[in-house]
Amino acid sequence: NEGDYYYDAAVWAAECGMVDGDIFAADTPCTRSSTVTYMWKSNGKPEIGEISNFNDVDASAEYAKAVAWAVEEEVTGGTSDTTFSPDDICSRGQIVTFLYRAF
């Protein structure tokens, strides 16, 4: 709705190709995979050298390139040497840390 505080940001995110669809779902929790995907898309979906080797990120996952970009750019190293935890909910602290490292 146009009166929602996030309306302009949601329209901007759609225009930038960060989100799509008819429903924004503003109250949906932000996962680690969605956070790095938003950042990767906002950076123009840069190509990466290799897909990461995390056990919990399948190379065919829609967020695999975003995760690989985030690792390559040192935005995150994952939650361990072998896991990224793509479905974990990001805290505000994690999100601002990702943003700080990326920008």
Image: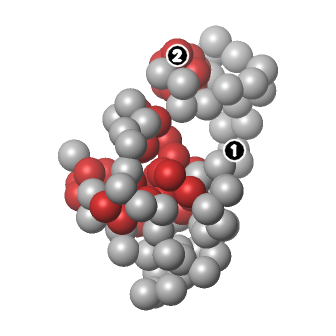
Where 44 falls versus 15 (above or below)? Answer: below
Q: Which residue: 77% across, 21% down?
A: 22
Whole-number angstrom distance, CA of label 2 to CA of label 1: 20 Å
Write down the residue under mark 1: 27
Residue 40 picture location, percent across and down: 42, 43
Does residue 30 appear in the picture of this structure?
Answer: no
**Coloring applied to the structure:** secondary structure
Residue closest to the far top: 2
Where is the N terminus found, in terms of image quarters?
A: top right
Q: Position of residue 53 (x, y in %)?
A: 50, 75
**Image quarter for residue 68?**
bottom left
Residue at the (47%, 81%) spot, across then down: 79
Q: Secondary structure at mark 2?
A: helix
Is 47 located above or below residue 61 in the figure?
Answer: above
Report x, y in % for residue 81. 43, 87
10 Å neighbourhood of mark 1: few (<14), some, or many (≥20)? few
Considering depth in this image, is 3 or 31 the residue closer to the camera? 31
Q: Amino acid at mark 1?
A: Asp
- Nearest to N terminus: mark 2 or mark 1: 2
Q: Which residue is mark 2?
A: 15
- Which-is-in-front pick, marks 2 and 1? 2
> In this view, which residue lies farthest toward the right?
22
**18 sits to left or right of 4:** left
Image position of 95 (left or right of 55): left
Nearer-the-camera pick, 96 or 46:
46
Q: Amino acid at mark 2?
A: Glu
Find residue 63 and report its horizontal and vertical position in percent. Answer: 59, 52
Tell me the residue at 51%/47% (across/down). Answer: 37
